[in-house]
Image (cartoon, grey):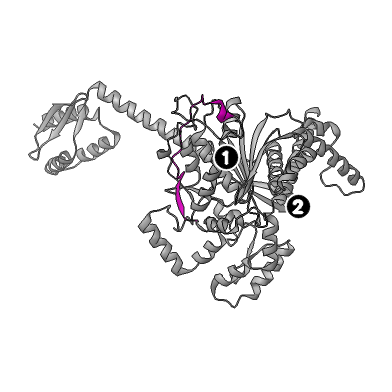
Amino acid sequence: MRLVCAANVQAKQARVSSSMAPAARSSLALLLRQPCWGKRLAAAQAYSATHSFQTSGYQQQSDPAGRTHEQPLQQEPREQQQAQQQQQQQQQQQQQQQQQQQQQVSTMQKQALSWQELHRAAQIAAWSGLCYVMPDELQARIQQQHAQLTLVAHGRNAFTGWFIVDGVVPHAHFCSTVRQRTAAGSRSSSNGGSRGGHISDDDADACAVPGGRRERFIFMRGVQWSAQDVDSTKLSQALMRLWPAHFPRIQPKTRNAATSSAAAKPGSSSSSSSSSNGKGTAGTAAVAAGAVPLVAHDGVAELAESMFDQLRPYFDQADDVGMPICFAGHSLGGSLAMLTIVQYQLQSRRRHSSCPSCYTFGSPPVLAHEQGGGGHRVLQALRLPSDCVKNFVLENDPVPRALLSVDPTFELLSSWGAVQGLLQLRQLLAGQGSPLSPGRFLFESVGQVHLIKWTPEGGSEVVPLDSHEIETELSFLAPKPGERRKADGSSSTAGSFMDAAATSDAGSSSSVAGGFGAALSKLVSPLKYAQYWLDHHHGSYAQELEAAALRGVKQQLVGQRQQQQQQQR
């Protein structure tokens, strides 16, 4: 009898273990090695109560009495299985696409600018300085110093001025400048004064690039309190209305690609608008106003909307001939340019694929997504690429840091424990990403942010920043990499006379309790204060960007020469 039972157990074990997992097989083997048949049976009942054995096409289920029943498996229809597989594949594809988009955004934000792009930015910064020229001198200044430009129109109002030109960025002229400067450097190298080596005329000619496409540039002026036509009261009141408001405030009208010729003529006061024909490219009038959840500086938004009707005929003319449009400005002018490109993107009747571009130089941010989350969400809502907007910030310019989370005043106040508690309470009530929360003051940086640095060893350098680096790199109070932390909470960097003076002033205030006094003394140092406003000047941006472009050209030419030498070897 025992032999028959053993044979039955072995047969059943072979039948069951053939379709069992390795872990289940090992558990069953341990079960069958029990010395006592009574203990073995009790263990088998306990095991079978918690496990079910599957064979091909059948499922064995055990009841508490120890009886085993084999039931056929309930197989799902093939259509359901295929649908589930398709859903899983679609989810995987969506996840991969999201990861690729995030990687592309991060790559675009971190991608260093070439010397051609740096020279383009330097030239645009220099042209933006013409906004501060008197209107009767603007035409003569352009003809004398910028022959490659054609003045289209210019105007002024009670708070700013603007002008429009058509032209091409002169890379060829820049290459001749490189040749002249490298020739001067070669003469100094004979006296032991050159640091980068001689670059021949052939090398300088190699950096030349073909002429670019003709563009329409729209420049807007920053604050100029001394201008006679500026209404100081109106402008100051507008700047003080800084709380975020929905933008655009006026419902934009969709534009048809075939409007009347009067709208395409600059200076015409009449323009026709009709419903969109639905054939625009991504980012044109097809973007509905209700689908753009943006907020902007209330006062600056009003100024930008009042200017748009004056500028719209010139946009239409460029759209009709397929001419790319570039918006630019220094200080407040860059903020106005940022809001103008938003209105243009919503109302444009472009029939070509080129996207508008925008360059800001030392401009305070005035735009954000209503739910926060980063400036890239603004461009996604407008269906614009991340590289269409470039913001340039000098290392010691306080203006482009205003209204951000790195605003010196906001950082200074948020260092207090009581203010931190209020900000956290505000975040709980209004939600994460709302204004006046721990991670956001009022607005956010939209587009690429490029920090312009200067070092005695390398000269001018333009460093791209991603969204995670803006907090530390643009902060005046947070310690930078390479700085040494002092005992009183302040930081200092060796090598700069003004930094040393600011550090000494910060050390003299060590009697003030906590890091608040050290941070305050670091901000109000007289030498630092002077350096801040010198860096904000529009001429400083043009000079530093041109120097960075020259540095990039030399690095490229030296690399090409070294590569040729290696190939010859």
| Residue 304 or residue 112, whichever sits in front | 304
Q: Is residue 218 visible?
A: yes
Q: Residue at x 58, y 29 (%)?
A: 264
| Residue 242 or residue 525, whichever sits in front | 242
Query: On the image, which quarter does residue 9 sit in?
Result: top left
* Residue corresponding to mark 1: 310
Position of 148 compared to 415: left or right?
right
Q: Residue at x 45, y 36 (%)?
A: 98
Q: Is residue 398 above or below residue 545?
A: below
Q: Tell me how far mark 1 sits from mark 2, CA to CA.
A: 48 Å
* Number of residues whose C-alpha sits closer than 10 Å to that of mark 1, classed few (under 14), some (14–19) or many (20 or more): some
Please state the extent of the stretch shown in magenta in the rendering: 242-264
Q: Are marks 1 and 2 in contact (CB under 8 Å)?
A: no
* Number of residues whose C-alpha sits closer than 10 Å to that of mark 2, classed few (under 14), some (14–19) or many (20 or more): few
| Residue 113 or residue 212, whichever sits in front | 212
At label 1, which amino acid type do we have? Gln
Position of 516 compared to 559: left or right?
left
Predominant SS along the magenta part: loop
At label 2, which amino acid type do we have? Glu
